[in-house]
Amino acid sequence: MPLGRLQTQITFLGSSGGPVEASNCAVLVKPAALTYSQVLQIPRTPLVLVDAGAGLLLLAELVADDVRSPARLLLLYSDSAPVDRYMKVVRTHPFRDLPGAPISVLNAILAKVGAVLISHPHLDHVLAAVLNLPAMDGAAPCGVYGSAFTMHALQTHLFNGVVWPDMVHAGVLQLNAVEPLYEMRICGDTYAVVRFPLSHGRTCSSETYESLAFLLTCTDSGAKILIFGDFEADSVLRLAHNHAVWRHVAPFVLDGSLRCVVLECSMPNAAPETNLYGHFTPRHLIEELAVLAANVSEHEKMPLRDLHVVVTHVKENIRGSDPRRTIQNELEELNCQAGLGARFTMALSGVSFVV
């Protein structure tokens, strides 16, 4: 199958960086060659969930009405644009016409999630993985994967019998620590996954807070998608974690197998550096993409022209103006100045597309 063909379907169950609590980061991924009707009929579990800040409620809304759901966050602002104004990808509607009540359909879809990848244990990335567990009634425990740091945090601080029942001891959940750069197979061999360490700021004790990026490869097609958890620019802590990721994936941008990167940009450029708390502004994001571009080609104009960059984890602006419009405009301007050619899409909870 030729590289660069559209092969991966992505659904944002959540895309907000807070402080609203119902639409936080969660990305549902499946091979585009399979429809959800087919997914529900096969014995395999070919779906993977990357982070779990949102879950059943957002999925139920999508099954019930996948037109209104993506506009939900935009209703918070009087100056929001139409949904398609935020998109450089073609939206799809993969949950339409699935028969049955939404609660029954989403339960069937949930049973087809073969793995949950957690970038870091902050609540806006794990809350649904906790609350939705009673609906995970499969024969095998739900497999959750991440760093040893994250698995320890989930067991010690959430599934400890105090904050929440110990679902690991009950056999409902299986926590799996994965080594950096180790390729593992998940979802019945549907995907190969490599995880990369990232920095997400510093703790109160001045220790680096660990987050992850995941490179998912569809084993049938070779199509890849790179999804980052929360992280900060290398220029802030000068740890070169991000540089290592860009160097690793640059060949895949060149050969067309990597056509989409999902990463955060939490606040506009006006945000003070001291208030970022391990997050990105558009300036930081363009700095990082310039590193990727240099690894792809030092001489070619617009080296990232075939790359979709999907921006998630935007923090809602309680002062009233839509932060996504501001961030999108700043990114487009800086992208043009840097000559990168990247295509920016602002993620919205409830949006699906194929790349």
Image (spheres, rainbow, N blue to C red):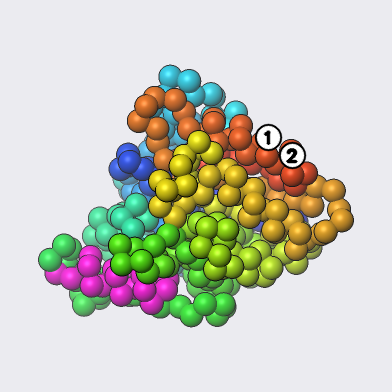
Coordinates of residue 59 in the picture (x, y in percent): 39, 45
Where is residue 150? Give x, y as percent.
Answer: 36, 70
Q: Amino acid at mark 1?
A: Glu
Question: In the figure, is residue 227 to the left or right of 165?
Answer: right
What number of labels is visible?
Answer: 2
Crowd class of label 1 (few under 14; some 14 to 19; many from 20; radius 10 Å): few
Q: Which residue is mark 2?
A: 337
Seen in the picture, residue 278 relative to 101 is either above or below; the reply is: below
| Residue 260: image location, x then y, percent | 64, 53
Disc 1 secondary structure class:
helix
Density class for disc 2 (Cα within 10 Å; few <14, some 14-19, many ≥20) is few
Does residue 183 appear to the left or right of 129 in the view shown?
A: right
- When asked about the image quadrant of residue 282, the answer is top right
The stretch of residues the image draws in magenta is 138-161
155 part of magenta stretch: yes
The residue at which mark 1 appears reads as 333
Residue lying furthest top: 78
Q: Measure the C-alpha gap from mark 1 to mark 2.
A: 6 Å
Quarter of the image that includes the N terminus: bottom right
Residue sitting nearer the eye, 129 or 25: 25
State left or right for residue 327 relative to residue 257. Answer: left
Residue in view at x 40 percent, y 65 percent: 209
Residue at far left of view: 162
Q: Residue at x 21, y 77 (%)?
A: 169
The percent position of residue 102, horizontal first and vertical second, equals 35, 42
| Residue at image point 70% right, 59% down | 292
Answer yes or no: is residue 235 visible: yes
* Quarter of the image where one finds residue 261: bottom right
Residue appearing at x 54%, y 30% in the figure:
325
Q: Nearer the viewer, residue 15 or 335?
A: 335
Tell me the kind of residue under disc 2.
Gln
Asked if disc 1 and disc 2 are in contact, CB closer than 8 Å, the reply is yes
